[in-house]
Image (cartoon, grey):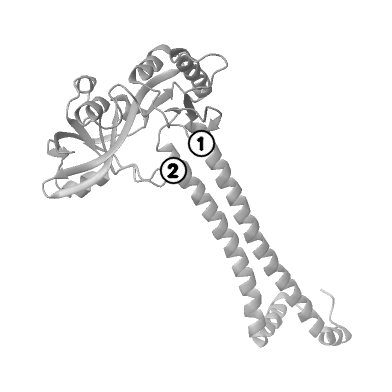
């Protein structure tokens, strides 16, 4: 029997057992599709988390006030005000592994333009903050060191705030009111998207930290910092920068050898590695589940083939009796 004749016999057999053929193909289709979909979901989640964490910035450390242990009890970092702008200034100037450092203070409040009112996140920092976070100004400019020193009432708008308050209108040079105080819009920030915690990073107003604390009385007492963002000179120096920051702050805060730190240093690069490891594990798990589906489909096909051969035992015997070969 040549290949063409064998194909005709196989096709007639498939047509004669339509339901069996459909179910057999369906098992394999579902199995293969499950593998593709599960692996794609895992890879997509990995890329999304990596992009979200990368949007925070590169080679960054985040110093938070408060220790994870206080008076023998575990407590969340950030629970006490122990960081100052002077700490940030010292970190940026004295440590060789650090490229830049900036204090950060956050608050929230109403922002008004015309008849539009929106409650958003107010972020105070130094001019270096945007560069450290790889956050570009798509229109206008960043605020300056002189404006920070003078606590000038200038601000930059995130895309969400800009679209909500102004729509298609150009916000540059316009006067908005934050906590009923007039501010001049000097810049519009590039779109950032969601943070790893799921927050809209574009729903924000960025302004000098001195303005936030002195003119609006928000974001902590003047001279303090909710956190300090530190950028190492490159990826290879992140660990060394973390060690140097810890030593400098312990010295500045006069913490004894046996005493617990009153601050916490978080390595954002390690957060990225942990997130990628978690998503890789999830991808492997999803791939394993999908592979089981494919295996079940394969076993189903094997059973159908065995049944088909068993049913055709007599036919095969007759064919061989009249001269058919095994192949």
Tell me, yes or no, whether the two marked residues, 1 and 2, touch with CB atoms within 8 Å.
yes
Q: Name the residue under label 2.
A: 196
Judging depth in this view, the residue of 326 and 199 nearest the camera is: 199
Q: Residue at x 57, y 44 (%)?
A: 278
Q: Mark 1 points at which residue?
A: 271
* Res 139 seen here: no
| Residue 281, x across and y down, in percent | 61, 47
Horizontal side of residue 312 vs 212, given as left or right: right
Labelled disc at residue 145: none
In the depicted structure, whether residue 20 falls above or below residue 117? below
In the depicted structure, whether residue 156 falls above or below residue 28? above
Q: Residue at x 76, y 81 (%)?
A: 308
| Residue 285, x across and y down, in percent | 62, 53
Judging depth in this view, the residue of 222 and 1 nearest the camera is: 222
| Residue 287, x across and y down, in percent | 62, 55
Judging depth in this view, the residue of 292 and 118 nearest the camera is: 118
Instruction: Assign a secondary structure to mark 2.
Output: loop
In which quadrant of the rendered view does residue 253 lie?
A: top left
Mark 1 or mark 2, earlier in chain:
2
Instruction: Assign a secondary structure to mark 1.
Output: helix
Horizontal side of residue 28 vs 64, given as left or right: right
């Amino acid at each position: 029997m040549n290949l063409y004749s064998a194909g005709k016999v196989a096709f007639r057999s498939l047509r004669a057992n339509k339901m069996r053929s459909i179910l057999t193909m369906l098992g394999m289709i579902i199995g293969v599709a499950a593998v593709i979909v599960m692996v794609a979901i895992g890879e997509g989640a990995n890329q999304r988390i990596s992009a979200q964490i990368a949007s925070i910035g590169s080679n960054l450390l985040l110093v938070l006030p408060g220790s994870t242990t206080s008076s023998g009890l575990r407590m969340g970092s950030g629970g006490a005000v122990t960081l100052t702008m002077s700490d940030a200034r010292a970190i940026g100037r004295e440590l060789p592994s650090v490229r830049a450092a900036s204090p950060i203070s956050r608050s929230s409040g109403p922002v008004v333009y015309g008849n539009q009112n929106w409650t958003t996140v107010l972020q105070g920092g130094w001019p270096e903050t945007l560069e450290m976070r790889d956050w570009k100004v798509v229109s206008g400019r960043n605020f300056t060191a002189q404006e920070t020193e003078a606590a000038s009432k200038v601000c930059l708008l995130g895309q969400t705030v800009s679209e909500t308050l102004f729509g298609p209108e150009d916000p540059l040079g316009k006067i908005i009111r934050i906590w009923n105080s007039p501010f001049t819009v000097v810049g519009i920030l590039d779109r950032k998207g969601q943070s790893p915690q799921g927050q809209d990073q574009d729903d924000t107003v960025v302004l000098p930290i001195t303005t936030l604390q002195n003119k609006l009385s928000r974001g902590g007492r003047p001279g303090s910092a909710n956190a300090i963002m530190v950028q190492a000179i490159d990826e290879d120096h992140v660990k060394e920068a973390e060690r140097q920051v810890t030593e400098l702050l312990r010295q500045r805060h006069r913490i004894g050898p046996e005493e617990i730190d009153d601050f916490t240093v978080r390595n954002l690069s390690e957060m990225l590695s942990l997130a990628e490891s978690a998503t890789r594990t999830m991808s492997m798990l999803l791939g394993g589940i999908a592979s089981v589906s494919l295996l079940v489909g394969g076993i189903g096909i094997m059973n159908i083939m065995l049944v088909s051969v068993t049913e055709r035992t007599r036919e095969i015997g007759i064919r061989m009796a009249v001269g058919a070969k095994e192949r």
